[in-house]
Amino acid sequence: MSKAIVLLSGGLDSTTVLAIAKAHDFKCYALSFDYGQKQSSELESAKTIAKQSKVVEHRIMKISLADIGGSALTDDKIDVPKYSKSDEIPVTYVPARNTIFLSFALAWAEVIDCQKIYIGVNALDYSGYPDCRPEFIKAFEDMANLATKQSVEGEKIEIKTPLISMTKAEIIHKGLSLGVDYSQTISCYLANSNGEACGECDACVLRINGFNNANIKDPTFYQ
């Protein structure tokens, strides 16, 4: 069995990606981040999901993007807004987050001799973050294959994005077909310590709409 690193936030998308990687018979290593986000209940979900999925190893990397700030998810001076249909990149965008997360995954991949990195980015039902687009993923993959010892020696890195062109409803149907329990996942930017979602932020509304469009009962616990 080949190895795969899966970026696991504890949310709907990353949990689906983990299920997809396992369905492809990869030995999965889950990687989560305690990056200074205002709500950390998603990390408890990630722990539960990783354990239930029987990953080979689950690591939670502690880094402090809150020291940089500039995002409603990490900066106490910026409030998390309610859902908006604006075409502007929202204040919930965390500067360079996926670039940083993928870089940590890339480093770990070198250590464990792994050439597949899975990430649950999506470019349809999403908040408009620039680091969720196919162009970014392609550019990062190109960089990874220039920057790493294993790629120079012939083991090429692949950044796998199985959800990138799927709607949220399609993602939900895919996950359910693989046995994902979405009641264990947390997507909300303002979930409380009990993991209850606000129901009003971008992540919540996209999730709610996804379940509605999929004609599936939403198992999320709301405040």
Image: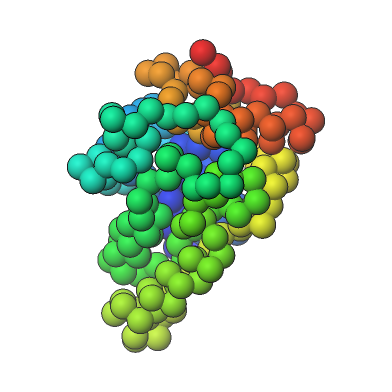
Indicate whether 163 appears above or below 77: below
Residue 174 visible within the image: no
Name the residue at 50% across, 71% down.
138
Residue shown at 28% from the left, 29% from the top: 76
Image location (x, y in percent) of residue 202: 55, 34
Image quadrant assignment for residue 42: top left
Above-or-below relation of 148 to 119: below
Task: Using residue 186 as the reference point, say whether residue 147 is left or right of it.
Answer: left
Give the quarter of the image for residue 156: bottom left
Quick check: 115 above or below 18?
below
The answer to whether any part of residue 142 appears in the image is: yes
**In the image, is 90 to the left or to the right of 181?**
left
Residue 115: x %, y % from top left:
43, 70
Spot the residue most to the left.
67
- Outermost residue, right side: 215
Q: Foreground residue, 214 or 38?
A: 38
Task: Locate residue 21 relative to residue 124 in the image: left or right.
Answer: left
54, above or below 95, in the image = above
Q: Residue at x 52, y 27 (%)?
A: 82
